[in-house]
Image (tube, helix red, strand yellow):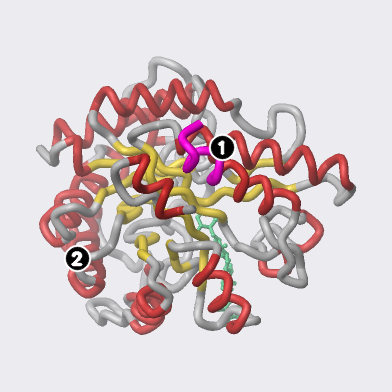
Amino acid sequence: TLQAVSTRKGQTFHFGSTYDTYDANQSWFTSVFSTFYKHVVSENGCKWDATEPSQGTSSLTECLACQSFATTNGDTFRGHNTFWHSQTPSWLPGSFSASQVVNTIIPQHVQQEIQGMGASITSWDVVNEVVGDGVSNGMTPLQCVQNKKVWPTVTSDGSSTALVTDLSFIYAAFKTAFTYAGSSTRLAINEYNTGGQDAKTACIISLIQNIQNNTAIPFNRLAVGFQSHLTASTGGFYTKSALATTFSTLAALGVESMITELDISLNSNNQANLRYQAAIWGDYLDACLYAANCNEFINWDPRDDLSWRGTSAAATLFDGNGNPKLAAYEVAARLANYAAGN
Ligand code: G3I
C-alpha cells in the first residue's frame, strides 16, 4: 500500500515511527518496521547528549545503529535533532560566550553529526523547539524565539540569555547543516502545539522565511516539522482543514511540511475514546496525504508501553502488548483509500 501511496504522490511517502536499540521487544520492532512502518527516527539516539558526550568527540554509535536498523528493514531514516536545549551533554552549557556557541560549538556539533550520518537522511530537525509558547500575532521572528528556553543556561522558560540577542545561533545551525547534508535532505525547524492558524504557527512561518533570507538556503531544502503531540479531547488537536491551510501556506513558499511526532493521548481507554483517537489519526494522515508538500508522517513511540507519555495515556498505534489499536486499522484504511485514488 505504501508503494501505491508513493506512486500516487509521485515521490516516496515516508510513514514511520521511533526506534532506539535499547527499546524492549526488539523482535516486535523488526517485524513491525518490515511490514507496517517503512521510516525510522531515533527517539533519543541522535540527540546531542548521545552524539557528542564530550566537546569535539563525535559518538554516533546509537544514531548509526538506528539508521542501520532502518536500512536492514528496507526503511528510510530521518535525523532528530542537531540542536535542542534539552538532552544536552554534561559539558554544556559550560561557560562559553554567545559568540563561541554560535561560531564554534554549534557548527562543530552540527557538522560532525550530519557529516557522520551521511547523505541518505530524508530530513534533519536542525533546530528543535525554539519558538516560544506565549507568542502573539505580529511578533518578529526574534520576538518569537526570545521568550523560549533555547539553551541549557537559561534557568527557566521565558528568560533568554545572551545567546538570544539575535537569531545567529539558528542561522549557524542551518548554514552548517546545508553545507554537510545530502543534496536532497530537507532541513527542518521542528515544533509542538502548531499546525493551525495561530500565533505560534505564524511565528514558525515567519521564522522559516527569516532563516531563508539570512542563510540563502533555497526554500526547497527547508521544512517545518509539526510534532503533533495531541490529546483526543476538544481543542487537543487541529482540524484537517486547519492543517491543510497551513501546509498550503508553506507549499506556496516551497517549504515541506511534515508530521514528525504524532501521538494522541486518551483521557481513558474506552471504546468511544479509541474511536475518537482513530478519527483524529485518520484526519492528520489525510491532511498529509492530500498535501503535495507533506511526505513524512511519523508516530512517536509505536507502542503504548514505551510511550514517553506513559502507559496510561494510551497515545499510540499499538497497545502495550504490541497489538494494533483501532487507530492502526484506521491509518491502514486511509492509506489504502488514498492508494486507491480516492
Ligand atoms: O538512557 C537513560 C538511562 O540510562 C537511565 O537509566 C534512565 C533513567 O534516568 O534515563 C534514560 O534516559 C532517558 C531517555 O528518554 C531514554 O529513555 C531520559 O531520562 C528521558 O528524559 C528521555 O526522555 C525523552 C524525552 O524526549 C526527553 O526530553 C523521551 O524518551 C522522548 O520520547 C522525548 O522526545 C521528545 C522529542 O525528542 C522532541 N519533542 C518532544 C518529545 C517528547 O518529549
Q: Is residue 99 visible?
A: no
Q: What amino acid type is highlighted by mark number 2?
A: Ala
Quarter-of-image position of residue 9: top left
Residue 336 drawn in magenta: yes
First-in-chain label (2 vs 1): 2
Residue in the image at 74% along x and 66% along y: 323
Residue in the image at 15% along x and 31% along y: 213
The tally of labels here is 2
Magenta stretch bounds = 335-342
Residue in the image at 38% along x and 44% along y: 295
Residue to which mark 2 is pinned: 119
Viewed as shown, does residue 160 lie left or right of 300? left
Percent of width and height locating residue 200:
47, 28
Quarter-of-image position of residue 219: top left
- For the residue carrying disc 2, how many other residues have a C-alpha within 10 Å: few (<14), some (14-19), or many (20+)? some
Front one among 5 and 296 = 5
Determine which of the numbered discs, if any, sits on residue 284 in the image.
1
Front one among 322 and 147 = 322
- Helix, strand or loop for disc 2: loop
